[in-house]
Image (cartoon, grey):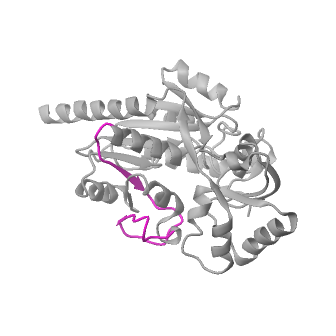
Amino acid sequence: MVSDSPPFWWRKTGWEALALAPFSWIYGAVAARNLRRGARAPLPVPVICVGNFTVGGAGKTPTVIALAKAAKAIGMKPGVLSRGYGGSIDRTTVVDPHHHRARDVGDEPLLIAREALTVIARRRIDGANRLIAEGANLIIMDDGFQSARLHVDYALMVIDARRGIGNGRIVPSGPVRAPTSLQLKYATALLKVGEGVAADPFIRLAARIGKPVMEAKIAPRQADNLDGMRVLAFAGIADPEKFFRTVREIGAEPVATRSFGDHQHLTDDEIEDILSTADSEELQIVTTAKDAVRLIGHHGRAEELARRMQVIDVDMAFDNPQAPTLIVREAVETARRRRAKANKA
């Protein structure tokens, strides 16, 4: 499996999308109902939701981490709420990065837990209450914009500059998760990630209706030792090509690449292929932090792969370095006004 989304989602509308249009109408109607539904549970702490308009990665995880770091820098105790996609635990759980494995709690929560208190929960209200019980005074939701039953004080919608919203159609005809007009209505601001023009028409639409638009890019951390090096790069994320571009940007030469599905755990044969190819071509193995955490705790050839590969860590670098702090402060102020209004009622 090389991708979780079909290629036609990211092309001009063709017969595949049109054939699935009736199913998209049903999916869109349900999604619209969920977005419009009132009576969302208010919490005694501010809530930020980091979401995206489409299925697939746009940079939510590094954005969540950036916000959590900003909150800690101003003296807050942020708690991150995740569904724990890809994990086997189905009860509300505080993620322990020293104890849990990706198969237990999911790869993204395991990464985030290194930076901030993180809870996985199938019902987000249960997870939110657990975070508050653990002392969190700010909740950052990793996804859940379209379906969560929590009141959100600040909804930051992340959009990839190169992919945009694809063909603009709703699942399964395209990658869009709910009618875009409704998503824009309930969004607080947009974060355009990377360079490219695919998202520009949508960004201009958002700006015309008064939605603030911020910009950022995925910035690899120090990796000077890879400059000029021949590498085998593998990635099991929503858009593996994004990682391969990062590899090239740091000066490495990806002689061989391997793409896997988002959250995919490698089979023995896939691990053997990576190791044997790297050996025969004399290549350094490189991968993402998200792929790396899925190998923690394994033995045999998987343990060897984890030992030999180099992880290219990345951060979300906002054009305005103060943007994460400003988002946190706005969420806090919005929540304060919300509570004051409720107290007067």
Residue 198: x and y, percent? 70, 32
Q: Residue at horizontal 40%, vertical 44%?
A: 68
* Residue 174 appears in the rendering: no
Q: Residue at horizontal 62%, vertical 61%?
A: 291
Residue at the extreme right of the image, as rendered: 280
Residue at the extreme bottom of the image, as rendered: 300
Residue at the extreme front of the image, as rendered: 225
Q: What secondary structure do most residues of the magenta stretch adopt?
A: loop
Q: Residue at horizontal 30%, vertical 55%?
A: 131
Residue 275: x and y, percent? 76, 70
Between residues 2 and 289, which one lies in front from this camera angle?
Answer: 289
* Residue 122 belongs to the span the image colors magenta: no
Residue 320: x and y, percent? 50, 26
**Horizontal relation, residue 290 to residue 154: left or right:** right
Residue 179: x and y, percent? 56, 39
User: Quadrant of the image for the C terminus?
Assistant: top left
User: Quadrant of the image for the N terminus?
Assistant: bottom right
Q: Give the range drawn in magenta.
A: 74-101
Between residues 65 and 162, which one lies in front from this camera angle?
Answer: 65
Residue at the extreme left of the image, as rendered: 344
